[in-house]
Amino acid sequence: MARLRAILIGVPTPDATTPAFAAADAIVERMDRFLKSRFEDAQIVRLGAATRKQDVLDAFATMATALADNTRFVVLFAGHGIAAQEGHELEAWALNGDEFTEDDLAAALVPFRTTDNIVISDCCFGGGMFAGGHHEFPLTSIAAAGADGFVIASIADQLIEEIIAAATGRWTYARLAEQFRTTAFTGRAFEIVTRPPGNMELEILAP
C-alpha cells in the first residue's frame, strides 16, 4: 500500500480586483476527501484563501520531512493562473497578494525527485507551470488548460471530478489523456504530461 503526502491549495480570490474563483474551496475539499478514502497512510496540508508564497514553501518543507518508501506526492492548486507575458516572465499561481511561479515549483520539488509526483494545476494557463523544461525527475502534470489557455469558470471543478472518476475506475493516465483530447473545446482543454513518457501507462493515483 502506497503512502500519500499532499499539499492542496485553494485560493478563490487572490486580490480585491480579481473575480472570485468560486469552486476553489470545493475542489480542495473534494480532493481531500477522496485521497483520505483511498490511502490509509495520508498526510495532507490544506492551504486556503489567505495563502502566500511562504506558506506554500513551508508546506513543501513539511512534506519533505515526511517522505518514505513508496510515497505518492500530490500537489493541487485551484484558483487563478497568471500567464507569462511582457512584464511578467513566468507562469504563476495567484496567491493572496502574492504568487508562486513555475521556477518556485521546480525548486520546491527538488527534494521529491525520488517519489511519485503528481501536480494538478487547476487554473487558467495551468500547463505553463511545467513548460520550463527544468523538471528532470519523475513528474505527472495535469492541467486544466495549456500555457496560453483559459478555463471556463463553470466547468472548473470538472477536472477534479474526472480525475477522481478515472482513478476510481483504475484508468491509466494514457486513457484519461485520450478522453481529455476527445472532449476538448475552447475553455476546456485539460492535458496530462508524464516524465518519463512511459509513466502514462501507470494507474492514476494507485493506492
Image: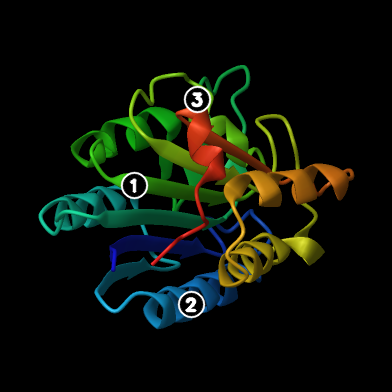
Q: Distance between the residues labelled 1 and 3?
A: 25 Å
Q: Give the foreground label among 1 and 2.
A: 1
The picture places residue 28, in percent across and down from the top left corner, at 50, 71
In the figure, 53 relative to 148: above or below? below
Mark number, residue 145: none
- Identify the image quadrant of residue 192: top right
Towards the viewer: 169 or 74: 169
Instruction: Name the residue located 38 percent from the left edge and 26 percent from the top edge.
Output: 135
**Is residue 124 placed above or below 79 in the rendered structure?**
above
Q: Mark 1 points at which residue?
A: 116
SS at circle 2 = helix
Tell me which label, 3 or 2, sits earlier in the chain.
2
Q: Residue at x 51, y 55 (%)?
A: 203
Identify residue for label 3. 90
Asked if residue 74 lies left or right of residue 12, the reply is left
The mark nearer the N terminus, 1 or 2, is: 2
Q: Does residue 189 appear in the picture of this structure?
A: no
> Mark 2 highlights which residue?
34
Q: Report whether 18 appears left or right of 195.
A: right
- The reply to whether dot 1 and dot 2 touch (C-beta < 8 Å) is no
Q: Name the element at disc 1.
A: strand
Q: Which quadrant: the N terminus?
A: bottom left
Q: Judge whether 32 appears above or below 52 on screen.
A: below
Q: Which amino acid type is marked by label 1?
A: Asp
Locate the C terminus and report the quarter of the image it occupies. Answer: bottom left
Give the SS element for disc 3.
Answer: loop
